[in-house]
Amino acid sequence: MTGDKRASRRRRQAGITLIEMLVVMTIIALFAALVAPRMLSKSDTARVTAARTQINNFMTALGAYKLDTGVFPSTEQGLQALREKPQNVNNWQGPYLPQEIPVDPWGRPYTYKYPSEHGDEPEIISLGADGQAGGEKFNADVVSWKSQ
């Protein structure tokens, strides 16, 4: 019988109690509550950085386009002029981008404007997370004429 008592005692001690399980679940919930917002903030930051990088790539390609043709593409020709030769453009040596014109990190097309209201170079705009002009933080526009 002493062997049976020992086996019974081991079985009771081997299990996890409800209180232990609740403590573990509470720790996991607290960890998730503290870490999740920071991770989401990092993805927003990454999208803004990606938009700036794409705009810089467009500006570099537009510089090469202007060196070859003597002018920037018009608003009507848009960024597509970096991929396909516009009508009535001489000395086009493109394509100036290796792939199709990407959408911004929020899935919307970039806005292209030339002549610009902000100097001698074209304007390229991503409307940010909210998709509307203006905004603050991650909703702010990402624009070619500011290096933010």
Image: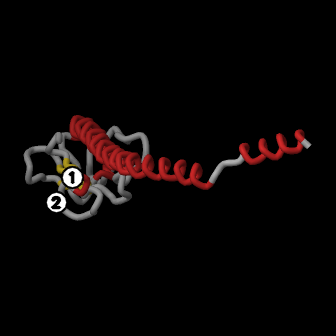
User: Alpha carbon of mark 1 to alpha carbon of mark 2: how far?
Assistant: 10 Å
Q: Left or right of 97: which side holds 111?
A: left
**Where residue 127 appears, x then y in whole percent?**
24, 58
Which residue, given by chain and number where applicable, does mark 2 sit on? 134
Q: Left or right of 83: which side holds 122?
A: left
Q: Is residue 135 visible?
A: yes
Residue type pointed to by label 2:
Gly
Residue 128: image quadrant is bottom left
Q: Point out the frontmost of discs 1 and 2.
A: 1
Q: Secondary structure at mark 2?
A: loop
Residue at image position (72%, 44%) is: 13
77 and 60: which is toward the camera:
60
Farthest residue, direction right: 1
Residue at image position (24%, 60%) is: 76
Q: Is residue 82 visible?
A: no
**Where residue 89 appears, x then y in whole percent?**
26, 48
**Where residue 12 appears, x then y in whole percent?**
74, 48
Which residue, given by chain and number where applicable, does mark 1 sit on? 137
Residue 109: image quadrant is bottom left
Q: Secondary structure at mark 1?
A: helix
Badge 1 density bin: few <14, some 14–19, many ≥20, Cα 10 Å: few
Badge 2 density bin: few <14, some 14–19, many ≥20, Cα 10 Å: few
Residue 92: image quadrant is top left
Residue at image position (36%, 51%) is: 37
Residue type pointed to by label 1:
Lys
